[in-house]
Amino acid sequence: MKSVTSTRKITRTMEMVATSKLRRAQARVQEARPFAEKVASVVENLVTPEIAELEPILRQPERIRTAAVLLITSNRGLCGAFNVNLIRKARELLAYLAESEVETEFHVVGKKGIAYFRFRGVEMATMRTDISDAPTADQARELITPLAERFVEGELDAIHIVHADYQSVMSTPPVARKLLPVYVPEEGPKRGAYYILDPSAQEILAKILPLYLTNVTYRALVENAAAEQGARRTAMKAATDNADEFLTTLRRQYNRARQAEITQQIAEIIGGAEALSS
């Protein structure tokens, strides 16, 4: 009972800490989403087949031969199946690319993902453990910029990112998104007559595409952080509830055993007294 009570204190404390961090993580997600959606909308409205031929970052490979996969996991455990689901999604993507005869290089963020794939003997091109629960845009830029530069140079034909999609505290499914190449419609976007571009669409895209890639990566980091705290809060609440149930069971067993011992002692005393009186 003392051991379970001590463990319950730990899980309850971790639940409270996760709840506090979750509120801040949710705020970051809510702040990042509108900007990311607007930037994506601008890109979609500006990209045309003609501009794609001129802008290096809009390169459309005829065939995907090499691809980079960026997996984002957590640095800490005790968050249920959060990391397991992300790792499973990454393995499915790697298997699919291998079946498609695509040469892949693997980049992992988070100690849990690194430890798993290192144990499995999977080669990792880069490993990052310095990204905290409150990721920044600079960290997102550090992650995606080298890969985007290699895409422009033709060393990579595609870039995928695997992270948790924060929908609610109870729903954080893993997703795999293709960052590059950017989808280019066969026909140009249907812009209204009110669209006036100054400077040209190509100049605008040259400035906004790096921002778009950084923002998509940053959104993946903040959503993953929020999903991690939500999963940890859920897991620690379940552990605390289980500890409460276990304590109730142990108290009943203890009380029954103590009552049985007292009853036995009373019976022995009565038996002894009757023996003396006879």
Image: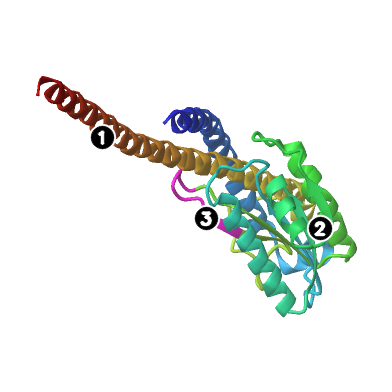
47 on left or right of 271: right
Q: Position of residue 258 (x, y in %)?
A: 28, 29
Upstream in sequence: badge 3 or badge 1:
3
Image quadrant assignment for residue 237: top left
Q: Estimate the x, y position of residue 267 in percent, counting from the top left.
A: 18, 29
Report the amino acid beneath label 2: Met
Label 1 packing within 10 angstroms: few (<14), some (14-19), many (20+): few
Q: Residue at x 47, y 27 (%)?
A: 9
Q: Residue at x 62, y 41 (%)?
A: 222
Could you tell me residue 13's position as x and y percent? 50, 27
User: Which numbered tag is attached to residue 124?
Assistant: 2
Which stretch is magenta? 167-175
- Between discs 1 and 2, the one toward the N terminus: 2
Q: Determine crowd level at label 3: few under 14, some 14-19, many 20+ residues with C-alpha closer than 10 A.
A: some
Amino acid on which disc 1 is placed: Arg
Tell me the tag on residue 256. Answer: 1
Name which residue type carries label 3. Pro
Q: Quadrant of residue 64?
A: bottom right
Whichever of callouts 3 and 2 sits on the residue coming sooner in the sequence is 2
Residue 195 in sight from this viewpoint: no
The residue closer to the viewer here, 36 or 207, is 36
Image position of 260 with respect to 123: above or below: above
Task: Tell us which disc is closer to us: 3 or 2.
Answer: 2
> Which image quarter holds the C terminus?
top left
Which residue was labeled with disc 3? 173
Q: CA distance from mark 3 to mark 1?
A: 46 Å
Q: Is residue 160 above or below residue 207?
A: below
